Image (spheres, helix red, strand yellow):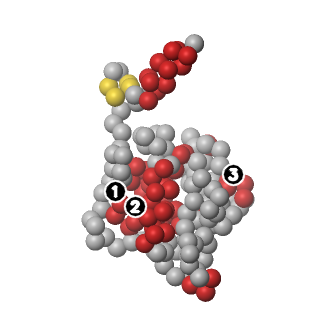
Amino acid sequence: MRSVVLVVALALAGGCTQDGLEEPSPPDELDHPFFRCRVESVLVRDCGFLRCHGSAQRPFRVYAPNALRNDVPRDRRAQPLTADEQDANYASALGFAGTDGKAALLLLKPLDEKAGGYYHRAATFYDRGNVFASSDDEGYATIAAWIAGATEAADCVPAEAGR
């Protein structure tokens, strides 16, 4: 029995195949400038609320102005994120990016179940449905592009989160 479980686990770890072709996986490290300039603002705007992922106790946590901050005095919580907070947001998102775009919890949890997403308690918190109604949502497409390997110039200008 133990060897059957091992064989199944190894087969699953090998990646999905279709007609004998292995699906491509994104790199282990996704582009940091693309995250900083495009993805982080989506996460701050849509996920970084204190009640949601603005908590250090959450497995997926997002630092955001006027929400969860790391060693920032109370009177400076509205200021832009520190470099350490930005790096922590990148690491947190990278941990939920999955091994391929189709299995990324970063995409599936905030996507409405009717559009193929997973159950996400936030859909009931604000009585407005899930974060992304469909994969056509601009924020969803931005995160999907990052997971698929999109890159950005190192000197790019970050988008405003605009809460």
Q: Residue at label 3? A: 121
Question: If the image is split into quadrants, where does the N terminus sit?
Answer: top right
- Give the residue type at disc 1: Asp
List x then y, in percent, for residue 108.
54, 45
Quadrant of the snapshot with the C terminus: bottom right
Mark closest to the chain's N terminus, 3 or 1: 1
**Element at label 3:** loop
Label for residue 35? Answer: 2
**Left or right, 134 with reference to 145:** right
In this rendering, would 102 be left or right of 110? Answer: left
Residue 145 in view of the camera:
no
Where disc 2 sits, the SS reads: helix
Q: Residue at x 36, y 51 (%)?
A: 29
Residue drawn at x 34%, y 56% is 31
Q: Is residue 17 visible?
A: yes
The mark total stands at 3
Residue drawn at the location 52% of the way across and 15% of the way down: 4
Answer left or right for 141 relative to 24.
Answer: right
Q: Residue at x 72, y 54 (%)?
A: 124
Question: Which residue corresponds to mark 1?
Answer: 31
Q: Position of residue 15 (x, y in %)?
A: 40, 30
Q: Is residue 38 above or below residue 134?
A: below
Whether the residues at callouts 1 and 2 have beta carbons within 8 Å, the answer is yes
